Amino acid sequence: MLRTIECFASPRGPTRDGRDRGGGGESRGKARRARSIPCRPVCAEITIRARRRSASVQKSFRAPPAIGLTNRATKTARTARSAVPAIVFALAHLLLVSTHASNWPQFRGPNATGIAAENSRPPLEFGPEKNLRWKTALPSGASSPVVWDDRIFLTGFADGHLQILCLKGSDGQILWRREAKADGIEPTTVKFSTPAAPSCATDGEHVVSYFGSCGLICHDMDGHELWIKRMPVIQTMDGFGTGSSPIIHHGLVYLLRDETEGSGFVYAFDVKTGEQRWCTARSEFRISYGTPVVWDGCVVCIGDLRVKGYDLATGTERWVVRGLSAYPCTTPALGQDGNLYVSTWSSGSANEPNPDYDQLLAQYDTNKDGTLTAAELAHTWMKDFFEIMDDNKNGLLDREEWQDIQNYMRTGHNVVMCIRPGGHGDITDSHVCWKSERGASYVASPLAYNHRLFLVKDGGMATSYDSAGKLLYEKQRLGADGEYFASPVLAAGRIYLCSAKGTVTVVDAEAGQCKVLARNSIGESISATPAISDNSLYLRTASTLWAFEEPAAQP
């Protein structure tokens, strides 16, 4: 059954000047609380074409149980969750990771952990001339490879068209390619984004793809469309585009879609039919680039200045933690101790403020005219953001523009934090086990493993904590500079780190310092997070998908 559902959620919520700017304080203006809207899509048209293979009778919805608990235990867990020890959630996390362990079913693998199966052995050293199984040319895009058995799924953008691709894992052959039709393409800044940034998600029967330009599309594994959830072209902050990927959990597709003027939502859809189960407004948010994760019976979503947990079954907001940065780009990490780890960093946060305008003039205003041009900032970190910062488009970065930016950015805090399960309401003071500002990462998400937390910052600087918050090492150089848009992944006791310049550094995951084991030059820029399945490392670069694997030992 192919379902096409036209969904036009009209923009709601306060204007930018009246939104809740959070940062651990009280709301300002007329910002409204997010509302849970159960099972009521705003639809203009529903079109159904019969397809016998999927024409199953729709069953009544049954809420998924809490992670790691049986249906019988769900009610007890909800009424006494605060008494459940963290070990239960740690076991649930291990079960979640071990399910279809050799597959990599979404962004960063099982529940976005970034951890490969225990028996995976990707190569330590690789490149265009070493341990290369195959490579396949791809259209542009930044979505990460998603792997199920011998199939790899990605998205792409070429000649104004959005695409979904399926490749054969054994040889890289493109098995099918489908176009995602859009009335318009979301605006993006070329250096930092692409209309094909979100990764696919699969459960082995369905492949769900999301584009900010047109919405959700579900195919079967052979590329037949099952349903489409059409959405209007998204409006994101400053042209950075869409970054959040869909996830599939217990038969539901969860999607985070925040927009600039408080018209964002978090959704749950039936993976078989595309029917909306619930959506909850996020009118107090205007920025989110991270992918949701499932933790403690909630779908967890990071946004500007705070992270929230929404009940998996109903979408009701369960808890919030404040004190994040104003421009978060990361996805939370699940620890084996049952805790949730968050790292966010933004330029100009309150605990790492940018210089004021007079300081900028003193350093960069070479013609002493009291303002700043693109040429004067051409050799600074601001060069890539000049067009965004020049809000009135007069070709200058003037005092008012700079001050408006800094006033907002200073509402946030760069932070690394650990959150324990079982909370309700505002749990900022009650459930944050520890927090620090040292080593907080910008785009690359944290990696939690073996009671440790690993972070990588732009410039190629690695930081590691133990699960109790003890700093093991801080900002140690990888020897591969540049920006880090891809998130770290772990296999065989090694962490794989991809710089935007095209170097993949491999470090020892268990060492007491940042011990580099290998540096591999690929020769193309890297924005997508790698995937690991069995003994293969799948790496997407600017124009190519590479499969690296050591040859099998000869008998």
Image: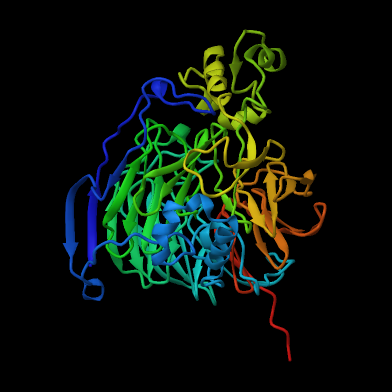
Q: Position of residue 339 (x, y in %)?
A: 60, 51
**Horizontal side of residue 441 vs 59, given as left or right:** right
Q: According to the image, what is the colour scheme of the structure?
A: rainbow
**In the drawing, does residue 6 fall left or right of residue 282?**
left
Along the horizontal axis of the image, is 296 left or right of 381?
left
Indicate whether 108 appears above or below 332: below
Residue 301 seen in the current view? yes
Please indicate, yes or no, whether residue 397 appears anywhere in the rendered image. no
Task: Give the image location of residue 533, x and y in percent.
Answer: 58, 70
All told, the count of numbered labels is: 0
Residue 494 lies in quadrant? bottom right
As rendered, which of 119 and 149 lies closer to the eye?
119
Asked if 422 appears above or below 326 in the picture, the reply is below
Return the residue nearer the eye: 457 or 176. 457
* Image quadrant in which you'd find residue 124: bottom right
Residue 157: percent from left, percent from top: 43, 53
Which image quarter holds the C terminus? Answer: bottom right
Q: In which quarter of the image is residue 282?
A: top left
Quadrant of the drawing holding the N terminus? bottom left
Residue furthest bottom as drawn? 555
Measured from the top left, where is residue 467 in percent x and y? Answer: 69, 51
Is residue 24 toward the left or the right of residue 460 in the image? left
Q: Is residue 526 or residue 115 the one in the foreground? A: 115
